[in-house]
Amino acid sequence: HPAFGDRLVILPNSDMISDTAFPDDIGPGLACGHGTHVAGVIHAIAPSAQLLPIRVLDPQGRGNTFVLAYAIEHAVNQGADVINLSLGADCGSQILDDVIADAIARGIVIVAAAGNDASITPNCPAALPGVISVAAVEETRVRAEWSNYGAWVALASPGVGITSTFPLGYTNEITATPGYASWSGTSM
Protein backbone atom coordinates (compact mmCIF):
# COMPACT_ATOMS: atom_id res chain seq x y z
CA HIS A 1 0.00 0.00 0.00
CA PRO A 2 1.44 3.40 -0.89
CA ALA A 3 0.69 4.78 2.61
CA PHE A 4 3.53 2.66 4.01
CA GLY A 5 6.14 4.42 1.85
CA ASP A 6 9.55 3.03 2.73
CA ARG A 7 8.42 1.57 6.08
CA LEU A 8 8.01 -2.01 4.77
CA VAL A 9 10.89 -4.43 5.14
CA ILE A 10 10.31 -7.34 2.78
CA LEU A 11 12.63 -10.27 3.38
CA PRO A 12 12.82 -13.68 1.69
CA ASN A 13 10.23 -16.20 2.89
CA SER A 14 7.80 -13.50 4.01
CA ASP A 15 4.78 -15.34 2.60
CA MET A 16 4.54 -18.64 4.42
CA ILE A 17 1.26 -19.57 2.74
CA SER A 18 2.21 -19.14 -0.93
CA ASP A 19 5.90 -19.79 -0.18
CA THR A 20 7.00 -16.64 -1.97
CA ALA A 21 9.13 -13.66 -1.03
CA PHE A 22 6.38 -11.01 -1.04
CA PRO A 23 3.54 -11.38 1.50
CA ASP A 24 0.65 -10.38 -0.75
CA ASP A 25 -2.67 -9.82 0.98
CA ILE A 26 -4.57 -11.71 -1.70
CA GLY A 27 -8.21 -12.65 -2.03
CA PRO A 28 -10.98 -13.22 -2.45
CA GLY A 29 -11.82 -14.44 1.02
CA LEU A 30 -13.19 -13.40 4.38
CA ALA A 31 -9.74 -12.37 5.60
CA CYS A 32 -8.63 -10.61 2.42
CA GLY A 33 -7.17 -7.28 3.46
CA HIS A 34 -6.83 -8.15 7.15
CA GLY A 35 -3.03 -7.95 7.21
CA THR A 36 -2.92 -4.70 5.26
CA HIS A 37 -5.61 -3.20 7.51
CA VAL A 38 -3.78 -4.14 10.72
CA ALA A 39 -0.45 -2.93 9.31
CA GLY A 40 -2.13 0.41 8.59
CA VAL A 41 -3.31 0.69 12.19
CA ILE A 42 0.23 -0.03 13.43
CA HIS A 43 1.68 2.46 10.94
CA ALA A 44 -0.76 5.15 12.13
CA ILE A 45 0.28 4.59 15.76
CA ALA A 46 4.03 4.29 15.07
CA PRO A 47 4.68 5.99 11.71
CA SER A 48 8.48 5.79 11.99
CA ALA A 49 8.52 2.07 12.82
CA GLN A 50 9.61 -0.39 10.18
CA LEU A 51 7.04 -3.09 9.35
CA LEU A 52 8.13 -6.66 8.61
CA PRO A 53 4.99 -8.32 7.24
CA ILE A 54 4.90 -12.11 7.36
CA ARG A 55 1.82 -13.85 5.95
CA VAL A 56 0.68 -16.89 7.94
CA LEU A 57 -3.05 -17.08 7.13
CA ASP A 58 -4.81 -17.92 3.87
CA PRO A 59 -7.45 -15.61 2.35
CA GLN A 60 -10.11 -17.26 4.54
CA GLY A 61 -8.09 -16.54 7.70
CA ARG A 62 -7.03 -20.16 8.22
CA GLY A 63 -3.58 -21.38 9.18
CA ASN A 64 -1.80 -23.68 11.58
CA THR A 65 0.25 -23.22 14.73
CA PHE A 66 3.40 -24.78 13.24
CA VAL A 67 3.56 -22.15 10.49
CA LEU A 68 2.73 -19.45 13.04
CA ALA A 69 5.52 -20.61 15.36
CA TYR A 70 7.95 -20.69 12.42
CA ALA A 71 6.93 -17.14 11.44
CA ILE A 72 7.47 -15.88 14.99
CA GLU A 73 10.88 -17.51 15.06
CA HIS A 74 11.66 -15.95 11.66
CA ALA A 75 10.66 -12.47 12.93
CA VAL A 76 12.81 -12.92 16.04
CA ASN A 77 15.78 -13.95 13.90
CA GLN A 78 15.27 -10.85 11.71
CA GLY A 79 15.56 -8.56 14.74
CA ALA A 80 11.92 -7.72 15.42
CA ASP A 81 11.36 -5.66 18.57
CA VAL A 82 7.57 -6.02 18.62
CA ILE A 83 5.47 -8.82 17.14
CA ASN A 84 1.78 -8.26 16.44
CA LEU A 85 -0.39 -11.39 16.30
CA SER A 86 -3.84 -10.36 15.08
CA LEU A 87 -5.07 -13.93 15.02
CA GLY A 88 -6.17 -16.60 17.43
CA ALA A 89 -6.35 -20.32 18.04
CA ASP A 90 -7.19 -22.83 20.70
CA CYS A 91 -4.60 -23.05 23.45
CA GLY A 92 -2.45 -26.13 23.92
CA SER A 93 0.24 -25.98 21.23
CA GLN A 94 3.60 -26.70 22.86
CA ILE A 95 5.55 -25.38 19.87
CA LEU A 96 3.65 -22.07 19.97
CA ASP A 97 4.06 -21.82 23.76
CA ASP A 98 7.80 -22.44 23.43
CA VAL A 99 8.51 -19.99 20.59
CA ILE A 100 6.54 -17.21 22.29
CA ALA A 101 8.27 -17.85 25.63
CA ASP A 102 11.63 -17.70 23.84
CA ALA A 103 10.75 -14.42 22.09
CA ILE A 104 9.60 -12.84 25.36
CA ALA A 105 12.77 -14.07 27.12
CA ARG A 106 14.75 -12.21 24.43
CA GLY A 107 12.94 -8.98 25.31
CA ILE A 108 10.55 -8.92 22.36
CA VAL A 109 7.12 -7.43 23.02
CA ILE A 110 4.28 -9.60 21.74
CA VAL A 111 0.80 -8.14 21.30
CA ALA A 112 -2.14 -10.38 20.36
CA ALA A 113 -5.82 -9.97 19.60
CA ALA A 114 -8.08 -11.40 22.32
CA GLY A 115 -10.59 -12.68 19.76
CA ASN A 116 -14.10 -11.89 18.56
CA ASP A 117 -16.24 -14.66 20.09
CA ALA A 118 -17.78 -12.76 23.06
CA SER A 119 -16.14 -15.43 25.21
CA ILE A 120 -14.32 -15.53 28.52
CA THR A 121 -12.46 -18.66 27.37
CA PRO A 122 -8.74 -17.92 26.92
CA ASN A 123 -7.66 -17.61 23.30
CA CYS A 124 -4.07 -18.19 22.28
CA PRO A 125 -1.59 -16.73 21.68
CA ALA A 126 -3.24 -13.79 23.52
CA ALA A 127 -3.63 -15.77 26.77
CA LEU A 128 -0.02 -16.99 26.91
CA PRO A 129 2.19 -15.67 29.73
CA GLY A 130 3.88 -12.39 28.88
CA VAL A 131 1.72 -11.64 25.83
CA ILE A 132 -0.13 -8.32 25.84
CA SER A 133 -3.67 -9.39 24.98
CA VAL A 134 -6.02 -6.75 23.61
CA ALA A 135 -9.83 -6.70 23.74
CA ALA A 136 -11.98 -4.20 21.83
CA VAL A 137 -14.12 -1.35 23.10
CA GLU A 138 -16.65 0.86 21.38
CA GLU A 139 -16.37 4.64 21.19
CA THR A 140 -18.09 4.84 24.59
CA ARG A 141 -15.29 2.71 26.12
CA VAL A 142 -17.72 -0.15 26.68
CA ARG A 143 -16.56 -3.64 25.63
CA ALA A 144 -17.64 -4.41 22.08
CA GLU A 145 -20.33 -7.08 22.41
CA TRP A 146 -18.34 -9.58 20.31
CA SER A 147 -14.96 -8.97 22.00
CA ASN A 148 -13.46 -11.73 24.13
CA TYR A 149 -12.80 -10.75 27.73
CA GLY A 150 -11.61 -12.06 31.08
CA ALA A 151 -8.76 -11.91 33.57
CA TRP A 152 -6.34 -13.11 30.87
CA VAL A 153 -6.90 -9.90 28.83
CA ALA A 154 -4.31 -7.17 29.51
CA LEU A 155 -6.03 -4.13 28.01
CA ALA A 156 -8.76 -2.86 25.73
CA SER A 157 -8.50 -0.50 22.79
CA PRO A 158 -10.88 1.00 20.22
CA GLY A 159 -11.88 -1.77 17.84
CA VAL A 160 -15.18 -0.74 16.24
CA GLY A 161 -15.34 0.91 12.82
CA ILE A 162 -11.60 1.49 12.51
CA THR A 163 -10.59 2.95 9.13
CA SER A 164 -7.21 1.87 7.82
CA THR A 165 -5.32 0.76 4.74
CA PHE A 166 -6.79 -1.91 2.48
CA PRO A 167 -5.25 -3.64 -0.56
CA LEU A 168 -5.65 -1.60 -3.72
CA GLY A 169 -7.73 -3.29 -6.39
CA TYR A 170 -9.89 -5.28 -3.95
CA THR A 171 -13.35 -4.35 -2.85
CA ASN A 172 -15.84 -5.92 -0.51
CA GLU A 173 -18.64 -4.82 1.78
CA ILE A 174 -16.25 -3.06 4.17
CA THR A 175 -14.44 -0.91 1.62
CA ALA A 176 -15.00 2.80 2.23
CA THR A 177 -12.76 4.30 -0.49
CA PRO A 178 -10.18 2.69 -2.77
CA GLY A 179 -7.22 1.66 -0.64
CA TYR A 180 -9.01 2.18 2.69
CA ALA A 181 -11.68 0.33 4.64
CA SER A 182 -13.47 0.41 7.96
CA TRP A 183 -13.33 -2.81 9.97
CA SER A 184 -14.11 -3.99 13.49
CA GLY A 185 -12.34 -6.57 15.62
CA THR A 186 -9.83 -7.11 18.38
CA SER A 187 -7.19 -7.15 15.63
CA MET A 188 -7.91 -3.49 15.05
Image (cartoon, grey):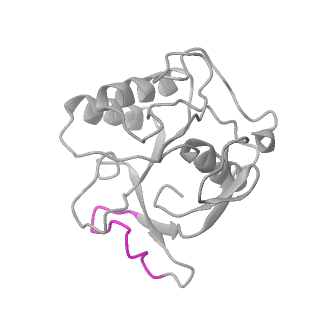
Q: Quadrant of residue 60?
A: top left
For the C terminus, which image quadrant? bottom right
Left or right of residue 181, residue 158 in this image: left
Q: Is residue 70 above or below residue 180?
A: above
User: Residue 9: horizontal and vertical position, in percent?
Assistant: 68, 27
Closest to the observer, 81 or 111: 111
User: Residue 45: horizontal and vertical position, in percent?
Assistant: 68, 56
Q: Quadrant of residue 32?
A: top right
Q: Is residue 148 in the magenta section?
A: yes
Left or right of residue 81, residue 66 in this image: left
User: Residue 43: horizontal and vertical position, in percent?
Assistant: 70, 48
User: Residue 19: horizontal and vertical position, in percent?
Assistant: 49, 16
For the N terminus, which image quadrant? top right
The span picked out in magenta is 142-154
Left or right of residue 80, residue 179 in this image: right
x 42%, y 42%: residue:
61
Q: Is residue 144 in the magenta section?
A: yes
x 30%, y 26%: residue:
66
| Magenta: main secondary structure | loop
Q: Is residue 180 above or below residue 21?
A: below
Closest to the observer, 24 or 68: 24
Q: How many marks?
A: 0
Closest to the observer, 138 or 101: 138
- Residue at the outermost bottom position: 140
Q: Is residue 63 above or below residue 128?
A: above
